[in-house]
């Protein structure tokens, strides 16, 4: 295994230091380090962060390889600074058995761009009727600890209670897609001024908030762990804040796009802005940013949702919901949270590496940059600013809402256990 010496990196945005990588670990951190056999990486002006961890990635394989594969999706992840992703279960076939989660896990290991931790389905076929093989998936080679029917809500309270009770046996977590289905039938856009103006059926905030409130109460009742996916409303923030004040085991994530984009963008009727949950109001964005800053929302998760051209570039009502996000996530968080003064780079490391790794029980990731830790490292240039060009994406899909938008920063290098998965022109 190669030895690397990263020179003059600003660790978490602090003073410049050198990082020596040997045998897949950080061997030393300090000033003026030397290692005759090391390949040197010039990190002058770059910020060093722990490798990013995504709790919510759709890799589409098996079944929708036209939109994404494990290989292409993990290449995109590495380009975005991620060293680990959690692959959601709504594939074809659904990842609801030990066999399917092990297949996804092995595809990730073979690709080698980042670690892939499969998320198991809560119910068979994500149909919400009967629990999937939670124990078998937990005991499999993939060691599944996060379970979600994402894309669908576990709307039956009895099924949700049983799932929460079951995963206690192996310290698992149920990650809920909070969407009361009866309140969102045919919904197209956040219910409010814009949906009325555009004549699109409204998606009420209470459809999310009602499920979150119910599930927080269920998690408290059975003493289990609940994770709330892609929180999008100010009301949801208040419910999660209340649940945490009780000491309940509730965590939550927010997507980059819900931190930056609001529902007025739908005025163009461009389905690139159609997503689940929908883009909300500017007031919601402000509440989400504050909640991420104060820790009410634990982490950022991309909800990277690749779609083929045919399923996205069509009329709004027929278009698939979702956006790709792995390759732009850090830049969007930079703009929404760092440039606004709500988070510093240590805070970014906490929300995009430490906490998601902890929630997902992902050993070896989300570790501080210190001697003896696995060398999972992202080097980021905060000073560049450029327009997003989807043609340069590693992802197979191009459904980004940021095309042509100027965003700050660029990932220059990503190291996975000391091996560069991305390294742009800095090697000497």
Image (cartoon, rainbow, N blue to C red):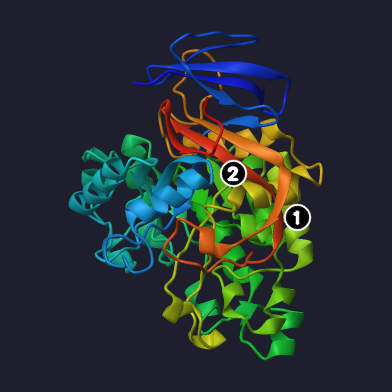
Q: Is residue 392 above or below residue 22?
A: below
Q: Earlier in the sequence, mark 1 or mark 2?
A: 1
Q: Quadrant of residue 48?
A: top right
Say which element carries label 1: helix
194 or 249, which is in the foreground? 194
Q: Position of residue 345 (x, y in %)?
A: 69, 34
Q: Which residue is mark 2?
A: 299
The disc label shown at residue 175, or none: none
- On-image quarter of the N terminus: top left
**Quick check: can you spot residue 251?**
yes
Q: Quadrant of residue 311?
A: bottom left
Query: How busy is the neighbourhood of tag 1: few (under 14 within 10 Å), some, or many (20 plus)?
Result: some
Question: How far apart in space, not on screen, are marks 1 and 2 (Cα)?
Answer: 14 Å
Say which element carries label 2: strand
Query: How busy is the neighbourhood of tag 2: few (under 14 within 10 Å), some, or many (20 plus)?
Result: many
Q: Position of residue 399 (x, y in %)?
A: 52, 69
Horizontal side, residue 235 vs residue 176: left or right:
right
Horizontal side, residue 309 vs residue 18: left or right:
left
Which marked residue is nearer to the observer: mark 1 or mark 2?
Answer: 2
In the displayed image of the protein, which residue is found farthest to the right?
341
Q: Which residue is mark 1?
A: 287
**Quick check: can you spot residue 298?**
no
Horizontal side, residue 149 vs residue 274: left or right:
left
Residue sitting at x 46%, y 24%: 375
Q: Is residue 149 above or below residue 22?
A: below
Q: Position of residue 93 (x, y in %)?
A: 24, 64
Residue sitting at x 57%, y 66%: 400
**Image mark count:** 2
Q: Position of residue 415 (x, y in %)?
A: 47, 32
Q: Is residue 134 above or below residue 381?
A: below
């Amino acid at each position: 295994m190669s030895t690397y010496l990263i020179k003059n990196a600003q660790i978490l945005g602090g003073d410049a230091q050198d990082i020596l990588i040997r045998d897949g670990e950080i061997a030393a951190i300090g000033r003026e380090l030397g290692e005759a056999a090391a390949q040197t990486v010039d990190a002058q002006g770059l910020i060093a962060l722990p490798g990013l961890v995504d709790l919510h990635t759709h890799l589409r394989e098996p079944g929708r390889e036209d939109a994404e594969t494990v290989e292409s999706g993990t290449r995109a992840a590495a380009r975005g600074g991620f060293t680990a992703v959690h692959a959601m279960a709504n594939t074809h076939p659904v990842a609801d058995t030990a066999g399917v989660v092990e297949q996804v896990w092995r595809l990730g290991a073979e690709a080698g761009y980042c670690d892939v931790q499969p998320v198991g389905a809560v119910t068979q076929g994500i149909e919400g009727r009967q629990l999937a093989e939670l124990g078998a998936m937990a005991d499999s080679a993939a060691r599944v600890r996060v379970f979600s029917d994402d894309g669908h809500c576990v709307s039956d309270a009895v099924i949700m209670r049983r799932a929460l009770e079951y995963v206690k046996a192996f310290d698992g977590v149920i990650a809920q897609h909070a969407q009361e289905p009866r309140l969102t039938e045919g919904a197209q856009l956040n219910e409010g001024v814009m949906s009325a103006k555009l004549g699109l059926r409204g998606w009420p905030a209470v459809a999310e908030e009602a499920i979150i409130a119910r599930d927080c109460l269920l998690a408290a009742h059975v003493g289990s762990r609940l994770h709330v996916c892609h929180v999008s409303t100010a009301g949801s923030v208040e419910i999660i804040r209340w649940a945490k004040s009780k000491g309940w085991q509730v965590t939550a994530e927010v997507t980059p796009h819900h931190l930056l984009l609001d529902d007025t963008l739908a005025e163009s009727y461009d389905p690139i802005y159609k997503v689940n949950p929908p883009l909300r109001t500017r007031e919601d964005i402000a509440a989400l940013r504050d909640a991420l800053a104060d820790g009410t929302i634990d982490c950022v998760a991309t909800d990277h949702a690749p779609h083929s051209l045919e399923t996205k570039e069509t009329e709004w009502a027929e278009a698939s919901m979702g956006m790709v996000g792995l390759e732009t996530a850090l830049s969007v968080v930079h703009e929404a949270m760092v440039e606004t003064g709500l988070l510093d780079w240590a805070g970014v490391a906490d929300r995009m590496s430490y906490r998601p790794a902890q929630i997902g029980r992902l050993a070896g990731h989300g570790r501080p940059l210190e001697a003896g830790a696995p060398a999972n490292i992202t080097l980021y240039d905060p000073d560049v600013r450029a327009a997003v060009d989807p043609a340069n994406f590693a992802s197979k899909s191009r459904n980004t809402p940021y095309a042509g938008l100027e965003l700050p920063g660029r990932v220059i290098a990503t190291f996975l256990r000391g091996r560069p998965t991305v390294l742009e022109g800095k090697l000497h």
